[in-house]
C-alpha cells in the first residue's frame, strides 16, 4: 500500500511539475481571492484584521477545490480511470497517494497565502507551533475528504459543479476549527486553539479511514 | 456447482472459460450468453460488426465489466464473484490509451510498469521494442501522433508481461512498421506462454495471426473453422486440446 501511495503521489506531483496548473492558475486565483477580500473590507481595517483567519481558510478551501478537481480530471482523460483499475494498484494506496499529492500542493499554496495575508492584511504571524499544526491537520482533512468525494463525483458529467456542493458542507467543521485555531494563535491565546486542532484531528482520522476502506468500491462505481 | 478448474489454473485448464456469460451495459445485454473456451498460448481473433459486443467481451474478460450471470472464469479466477482479482494478470489495449498527456513516454511506461511491479529492465526493453527508446522517450505524450501514442500504450502492456493479452483493434492507427511489431509481439507473447485475444476489422492481417476465429454477433459468440493449424499444437509440450467449445 505504501509503495502504491508513493508511486501515485510521485506521478501526480510530476504531472503538476510538468503542467504547472497549480502554479499558473490555482496560486494566482488564491491570491486574487485575498486581494478581493482586501478590496471589499479595506475601508474597515479592523474588520479585515479580525476576519483574516476566516478569509485565509476560505481562500484555501476555494483553491483546494481547484486542486482536487485537477487531481481527478487527469484520471478522467483517455481511459486513465480504467487503466488505474487494471493497474494492480491497491485502491487504498491510490487514495493515500492522491491525498499526499494534494496535501503537498495545498501546503505550498498555504505558505504563499500566509505571505499574502502578512503583506496585504498587515497580519503579524505568531503562535507558530499552533499555526503549523493547524495547517497540517486542516490540510489533511481537506485533502482526504476532497479525495473521497472527488472519486464519487469523478464519473459524473457534472463533476465540476457537483464536487463543491458535496464537499463544502462536509468541510464546514474544518473551516470552523481551523479559523478558531488561527484566531487563537494570532491572538496570543494558543491554549484556546488546541481543542479545535484535536477536533480536526478526529475528522482527519475519520476521513482517512473512510477513504482507505471506501475508495476501492467508489472507484469501481465512478 | 463450480467449474472443476476454478482457482486451479494449470497448463491444461482453459485460460478463458465462459458459459452463458451475460454482461449488461445499463439494461442492454451487450453479452447475451457467450460460450467460449480459450486454451493457453492461443491467439483468438474476435470479429463482428460494430456494436456486436467485441469490446464488451474484452472488457469483461479484463474484469472491468461485470458478468451478471452464467460462468466466467479467467486465469482460474471466477469473475462473477471477484473480477478485481484477475486484473493485474491481464493486459488490455483499448481504444483509449490510458496515458497522461503531460508526462513523457518514459514517465508513462515507468509508472504503469511499476504499478504492476515490473522489472526496470523490462521497461527499457519494452520501450526499445516499440521504437520509443530514442528521442521519443522524453517527449510529452500530448505531443505524440496517434500511432506513437498507440506504441506507448503497447509498451506499457508489454512491460507488464501479462498472462492474458486483450487487444482491441491493436493495428488501428499504426503504420506498417508498427503493425509488424504488433504481430511479432503477439507471436512472441504466446511463445512465452501468454494467451492473446484480439478484435480487429483488419482481417487479412489478423486471420494470418490467429489460431482461432470467433464471430461475435448480437452478444453471442460463434466459432468459425480454422484456416490453418495452430502453432501451439505444433509446439513440443504445448497444449493440444481444442481451444473452442
Image (cartoon, grey):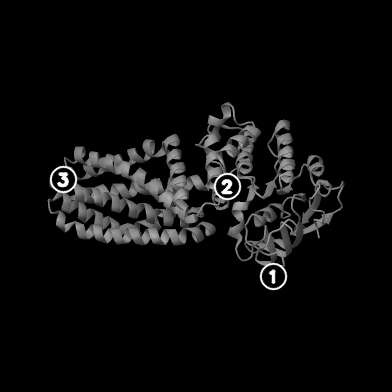
Tell me the subunit letter for badge 3. Answer: A
Q: Which residue is mark 1?
A: B2
Q: Residues within 10 Å of mark 1 (few under 14, many from 20)?
A: few
Observer able to see residue A173: no
Residue B162 percent coordinates (x, y): 64, 48
Circles 2 and 1 in contact, beta carbons < 8 Å: no
Residue A82 percent coordinates (x, y): 57, 51
Q: Quadrant of the rendered structure where residue B109 is?
A: top right
| Rendered view: B176 above or below A186 | above
Q: Which residue is mark 2?
A: A79
Circles 3 and 2 in contact, beta carbons < 8 Å: no
Tell me the subunit letter for badge 2. Answer: A
Residue B206 percent coordinates (x, y): 78, 43
| Rendered view: A68 above or below B10 | above
- Disc 1 versus disc 3: distance between alpha carbons? 68 Å
Q: Residues within 10 Å of mark 2 (few under 14, many from 20)?
A: some
Q: Helix or strand or loop: what does disc 3 sit on?
A: loop
Residue displayed at 45% across by 35% down: A18
Same chain for mark 3 and mark 2? The answer is yes
Q: Which residue is mark 3?
A: A126
Pair 2/1: label in front? 1
Extreme residue toward the bottom, this view: B1
Q: Quadrant of the rendered structure where residue B145 is?
A: top right
Q: Residues within 10 Å of mark 3 (few under 14, many from 20)?
A: some
Amino acid at each position: 500500500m505504501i509503495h502504491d501511495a508513493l508511486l501515485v503521489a510521485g506521478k501526480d506531483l510530476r504531472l503538476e511539475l510538468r503542467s504547472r496548473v497549480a502554479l499558473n492558475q490555482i496560486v494566482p486565483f488564491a491570491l486574487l481571492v485575498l486581494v478581493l477580500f482586501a478590496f471589499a473590507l479595506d475601508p474597515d481595517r479592523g474588520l479585515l484584521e479580525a476576519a483574516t483567519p476566516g478569509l485565509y481558510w476560505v481562500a484555501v478551501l476555494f483553491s483546494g477545490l481547484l486542486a482536487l478537481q485537477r487531481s481527478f480530471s487527469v484520471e478522467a482523460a483517455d481511459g486513465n480511470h480504467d487503466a488505474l483499475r487494471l493497474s494492480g494498484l491497491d485502491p487504498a494506496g491510490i487514495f493515500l497517494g492522491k491525498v499526499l499529492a494534494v496535501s503537498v500542493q495545498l501546503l505550498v499554496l498555504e505558505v504563499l497565502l500566509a505571505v499574502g495575508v502578512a503583506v496585504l492584511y498587515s497580519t503579524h504571524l505568531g503562535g507558530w507551533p499552533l499555526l503549523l499544526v493547524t495547517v497540517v491537520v486542516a490540510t489533511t482533512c481537506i485533502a482526504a475528504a476532497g479525495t473521497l468525494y472527488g472519486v464519487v463525483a469523478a464519473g459524473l458529467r457534472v463533476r465540476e459543479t457537483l464536487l463543491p456542493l458535496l464537499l463544502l458542507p462536509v468541510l464546514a467543521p474544518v473551516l470552523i476549527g481551523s479559523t478558531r485555531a488561527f484566531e487563537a494563535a494570532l491572538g496570543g491565546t494558543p491554549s484556546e486553539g488546541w481543542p479545535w486542532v484535536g477536533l480536526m484531528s478526529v475528522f482527519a482520522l475519520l476521513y482517512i479511514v473512510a477513504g482507505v476502506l471506501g475508495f476501492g468500491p467508489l472507484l469501481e462505481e465512478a | 456447482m463450480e467449474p472443476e478448474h476454478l482457482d486451479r489454473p494449470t497448463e491444461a485448464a482453459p485460460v478463458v472459460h465462459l458459459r452463458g456469460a451475460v454482461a449488461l451495459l445499463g439494461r442492454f445485454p451487450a453479452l447475451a450468453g457467450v460460450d467460449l473456451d480459450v486454451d493457453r498460448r492461443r491467439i483468438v481473433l474476435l470479429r463482428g460488426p460494430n456494436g456486436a459486443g467485441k469490446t464488451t467481451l474484452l472488457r469483461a474478460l479484463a474484469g472491468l465489466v461485470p458478468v451478471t450471470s452464467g460462468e466466467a472464469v479467467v486465469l482460474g479466477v471466477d469473475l462473477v464473484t471477484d473480477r478485481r482479482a484477475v486484473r493485474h494478470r491481464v493486459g488490455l489495449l483499448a481504444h483509449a490509451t490510458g496515458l497522461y498527456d503531460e508526462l513523457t513516454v518514459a514517465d508513462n511506461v515507468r509508472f504503469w510498469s511499476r504499478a504492476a511491479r515490473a522489472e526496470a529492465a523490462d521497461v527499457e526493453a519494452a520501450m526499445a521494442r516499440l521504437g520509443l527508446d530514442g528521442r521519443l522517450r522524453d517527449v510529452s505524450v500530448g505531443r505524440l501522433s496517434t500511432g506513437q501514442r498507440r506504441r506507448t500504450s503497447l509498451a506499457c502492456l508489454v512491460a507488464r508481461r501479462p498472462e492474458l493479452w486483450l487487444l482491441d483493434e491493436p493495428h488501428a492507427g499504426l503504420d506498417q512498421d508498427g503493425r509488424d511489431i504488433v504481430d511479432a509481439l503477439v507471436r512472441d507473447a504466446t511463445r512465452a506462454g501468454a494467451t492473446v485475444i484480439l478484435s480487429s476489422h483488419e482481417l487479412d492481417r489478423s486471420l494470418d495471426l490467429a489460431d482461432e476465429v470467433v464471430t461475435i454477433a448480437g452478444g453471442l459468440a460463434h466459432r468459425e473453422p480454422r484456416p490453418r493449424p495452430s502453432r501451439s499444437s505444433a509446439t513440443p509440450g504445448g497444449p493440444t486440446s481444442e481451444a473452442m467449445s
